[in-house]
């Protein structure tokens, strides 16, 4: 026979008596007092690059002086700006601010936070539940650093008349925040009817002075053709890291015999 404490704190009176095979003893009363110490949950202040992802399980510390297991967490985002950091879970890719997010302790590894897309700070909150009581809310600050625009370049190129070159092999990309390229844009500054031009599967001859949008995954789909006659022209490239565009980079395409 076991006795279980109450699911909430409080006290109650219980009784016991014994039987010796002939007679019962008098009832003896005793008090059962159920107590619980609320757990604690904390996350220290964090700093992320712009749009950087971090897993909350690596930040969260929880404890319970009674030895009770943590069964649930709640999170709250106090940053309301469109560019601020936010929480992500498999069932909601962008939790709105000022919303309680309930997470089972077994699913803590599925909660992520994404740094803001502009420099700034956001106050966020966490608390834990031990099956009986919630901890106090613990606030922590997420600081999002300013994004560094990427850099994209193509060195000067020389092609023979009507020769083709795959542009993806020519592009150099760098990003100080280690953000991958999300898109590229190209521009042909040569307006002569016989000058070189860009080709994609969607357009076999892009007109000069036209912005050509290319997803980073489709970079191998853009080609450059040397002019129909000898000459030179200026072309341009820039890259997008998901937040900012790089400056336009100019390069010269020279067509030779």
Image (cartoon, grey):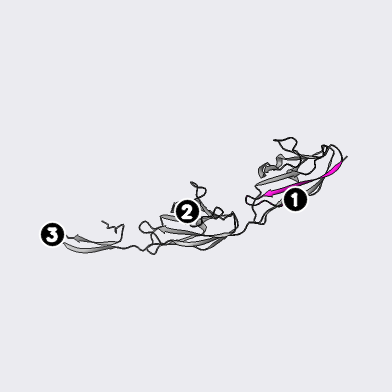
Q: Position of residue 20 (x, y in %)?
A: 14, 59
Indicate which disc residue 216 carries. none
Q: Nearer the viewer, mark 1 or mark 2?
A: 1
**Left or right side of 135 for 2:** left
Quadrant into which the N terminus falls: bottom left
- Specify few, some or many for label 1: CA neighbours under 10 Å numbering under 14, 14-19, or 20 or more: some
Q: Position of residue 57 (x, y in %)?
A: 50, 56
List the residue tagged with mark 2: 108
> In the structure shown, which secondary structural element does the residue marked by tag 3 occupy?
loop
Marks 3 and 1 sit apart, C-alpha to C-alpha, by 98 Å
Question: Looking at the image, can residue 254 be seen?
Answer: no
The earlier-in-sequence mark between 3 and 2 is 3
- Specify few, some or many for label 2: CA neighbours under 10 Å numbering under 14, 14-19, or 20 or more: some
Q: Position of residue 112 (x, y in %)?
A: 52, 53
Marks 1 and 2 sit apart, C-alpha to C-alpha, by 44 Å
Q: Residue at x 46, y 51 (%)?
A: 107
Residue 220 sits in which quadrant? top right
Residue 224 sits in which quadrant? top right
**Residue 257 highlighted magenta (yes or no):** no
List the residue tagged with mark 3: 24
């Amino acid at each position: 026979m076991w006795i279980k404490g109450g699911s909430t704190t409080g006290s109650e009176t219980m009784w016991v008596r014994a039987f010796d095979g002939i007679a019962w003893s008098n009832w003896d009363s005793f008090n059962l007092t159920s107590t619980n110490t609320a757990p604690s949950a904390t996350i220290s202040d964090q700093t992320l690059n712009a749009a950087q992802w971090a897993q909350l399980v690596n930040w969260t510390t929880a404890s319970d002086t009674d030895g009770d297991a943590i069964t649930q967490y709640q999170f709250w985002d106090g940053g309301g700006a469109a560019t601020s950091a936010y929480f992500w879970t498999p069932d909601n890719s962008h939790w709105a601010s000022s919303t309680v997010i309930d997470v089972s302790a077994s699913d803590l590894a599925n909660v992520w936070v994404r740094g803001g897309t502009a420099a700034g700070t956001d106050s966020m909150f966490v608390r834990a539940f031990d099956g009986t009581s919630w901890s106090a809310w613990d606030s922590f600050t997420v600081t999002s650093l300013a994004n560094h625009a990427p850099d994209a370049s193509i060195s000067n190129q020389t092609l023979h008349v009507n020769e083709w070159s795959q542009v993806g092999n020519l592009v150099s990309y760098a990003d100080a925040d280690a953000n991958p390229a999300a898109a590229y844009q190209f521009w042909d500054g040569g307006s002569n009817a016989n000058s070189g031009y860009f080709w994609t599967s969607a357009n076999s001859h892009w007109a000069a002075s036209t912005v050509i949008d290319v997803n980073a995954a489709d970079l191998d789909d853009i080609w450059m053709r040397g002019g129909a006659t000898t000459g030179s022209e200026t072309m341009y490239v820039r890259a997008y890291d998901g937040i900012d565009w790089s400056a336009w980079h100019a390069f010269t395409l020279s067509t030779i015999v």
